[in-house]
Amino acid sequence: MMNETNLYDISAEFLLNHLYPNQMDRWQVNCAGTFYRNYSEDILEIDEEKANILLARDSFLRLLPQGLISDDNALKGNNFEQKYERLKKKEELLRLLFKPVDTLAFRFRLHIENQVTQLSEKKLAFLLKYYFLYDITREKDPYIKRVAPFLLFISQLRANFGFIGDLLACLFNHKVEIHRGLYTWEEDERCASPAIEFQLIVPNLTAKTYDKLDKAIAPLREFLIEWFIPFDTHCVIDIKQHGHPFTIGESLTLDYNTEIGQ
C-alpha cells in the first residue's frame, strides 16, 4: 500500500525548486510564525512579481531572549493601547532586521533541495543502468521515458495487466479495454500460449489519426512487451473505435486485422 502525500507536509523549498528551478537567489522571505503551520500550508502567501514569500515558520528572531524585546511588565499600567502599539512596532523593526538572515538561510536550504533533486535524478539513471543495463539518458521516446522508472518495481508489475492497461490509458488519454485469451499457430489449442490484448478506444478514429497514434505507440509497445509481459504470453496493443455502428454511405476506418462477419 502506497503512502498518501499530505499537501500540508510539502515544504516551500520543494515547491519553489519544482516550480522555479532557476530563481533560487531572488526570493525574499518573511516569517509569520509556526502558529499558522498548525492549520495551513508552509507557504502562506507568494508574490511572484516581487519575489516575496510569507512562510508559516519562525524567524531567527525567535532565538533572541524574550527580555530583549519586552519585559513581563511592558503592558501593565495605563495607556495599554499605546504600549501595545510601541511593542508591535519594535517587533516589526526587529523582523525587518532579521529578514536578510531568514532570506539567506532559506536560499541556502533551497540550494540544498535543488542539489538533492539533481542527485535523485542521477540515482534513477544509475540504478536503471546498473541493474537493468538500460540507459535512460539516451532514451528519446517521450512515452518510454515516463514508463522506464517503473522498471525499479518490475518484480511486482510484470504480468500485472490491469496496471499496464491503466498506464496506457494515462499516457494516451483514451479508454483501454483488456481482452484475455489463447494464441496458437496451430488448430490444436493444447499447444496454445496465453494471450493478452490491449485496445485503445479512440473516438472518431480516422486513417490519419490511426497511423499517427500507431507510430507513437510502436516503440512503447516493444518496450512493454520486453519488460512487462511474460515471455510465454502473446501481447497485442491495438487501436480501435467501438460504439459507432457502420452506416451505409458513411466512412469507416478499419485496422489491419479487422474481421468482417458473414
Image (cartoon, rainbow, N blue to C red):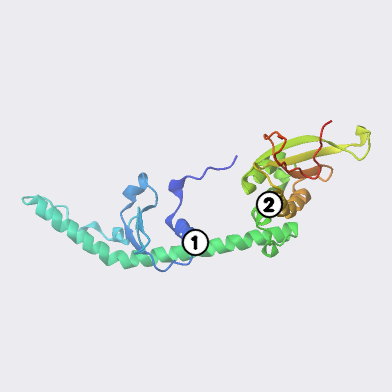
Q: Is residue 178 left or right of residue 53?
A: right
Q: Callout 1: helix, strand or loop?
A: helix
Q: Nearer the viewer, residue 141 or 90?
A: 141
Determine if residue 74 is in view. no
* Residue holding disc 2: 152
| The quarter of the displayed image where residue 191 is located | top right
Q: Is residue 228 left or right of residue 78?
A: right
Q: Is residue 48 left or right of residue 22?
A: left
Please tell me which of labels 2 and 1 falls first in the chain. Answer: 1
Q: Position of residue 20 (x, y in %)?
A: 46, 62
Residue 113, numbered label: 1
Q: Callout 2: helix, strand or loop?
A: helix
Q: Position of residue 207 (x, y in %)?
A: 72, 49
Q: Nearer the viewer, residue 247 or 182?
A: 247
Q: What is the three-letter code of the residue carrying label 1?
A: Glu
Q: Position of residue 165 (x, y in %)?
A: 68, 41
Q: What is the three-letter code of the residue carrying label 2?
A: Leu
Q: Position of residue 196 (x, y in %)?
A: 78, 39
Measure how far apart labels 2 and 1 are at the Cα level: 23 Å
